[in-house]
Image: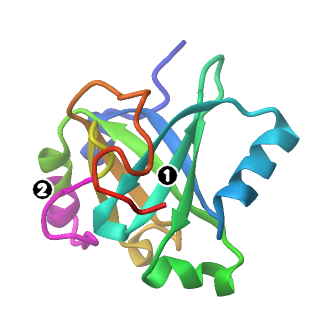
Amino acid sequence: MSDIFSGTGISKHILRTHHWGIVLPTVEKAEAFMNTFGLQEDYRGHVEAYDSHLIFTKHGLGADAIEFIIPQSGVLCEFNKGKGGIAHVAFLVDDLKAVQEEVRAMGMELLEPDPVEGTEDIVVNFIRPKYTQGILVELIQQVGEINHAATFTSRHGNKE
């Protein structure tokens, strides 16, 4: 399979698409979507920075993972008037700090001044959609092994 990225600018750091993020108001709605389409759960987590539960589906055979984002508080609770919807596309990168430097050199802004902890295995930042044709782009660097046994509450206390 040939490389689909040009190997210049930001793209020289992109390894692959990591996932598509979908905000939904409840875990039950995420599970119903997964059941409808036969999606298999890979793992769960909680992101303190955005106070959201996450459910990642498995990926493979050309299929990207889907990240269901279930906000517990904050601005994401009002995403699409509380109904949810597609929130972002995420790219796995080899060096998030280097990508941030490229993004800033291009005159674009990031959502956070520095990467924030995602689930326990990744750090993330986002390119503001005003620079990417209205699409929120998440940049991810994997910093550890995925904890497939993680739950919403395993790292951050009782948030269920």
Residue 114 in magenta? yes
Q: Position of residue 33 (x, y in %)?
A: 78, 50
What crowding class fits label 2: few (fewer than 14 Cα within 10 Å), some (14-19), or many (20 or more)? few
User: In this image, 12 relative to 83: left or right?
Assistant: left
Is residue 31 located in the magenta-colored stretch of the structure? no
State which tag comes first along the sequence, 1 or 2.
1
Report crowding for label 1: few under 14, some 14 to 19, many 20 or more residues within 10 A (C-alpha): many
Amino acid type for the residue under numbered disc 2 = Glu
In the picture as drawn, the residue positioned furthest to the top comes out as: 1
Vertical side of 105 occupied by 39: above or below: above
**Horizontal relation, residue 133 to residue 113: left or right:** right
**Looking at this view, is 90 or 9 the one in front?**
90
Which mark is on residue 54?
1
Residue under circle 2? Answer: 101
User: Is the N terminus in the top left, top right, bottom left or bottom right quadrant?
Assistant: top right
Q: Residue 19, position in %: x, y? A: 52, 42
Q: Amino acid at mark 1?
A: Leu
Look at the picture and state if 135 lies above or below 46: below
The residue lying at 59 percent from left, 28 percent from top is 58
Compare residues 137 and 42 and report the one nearer the observer.
42
Residue 155 x/y as whole percent: 28, 47
The answer to which image quadrant residue 130 occupies is bottom left
Q: Are marks 1 and 2 in contact (CB under 8 Å)?
A: no
Say which of 152 and 39 sits in front.
152
Q: Which residue ends up furthest to the right in the rendered image?
A: 36
Left/right of residue 154 with respect to residue 106 in the rendered view: right
Q: Residue at x 33, y 62 (%)?
A: 126
Magenta part of the chain: 101-117
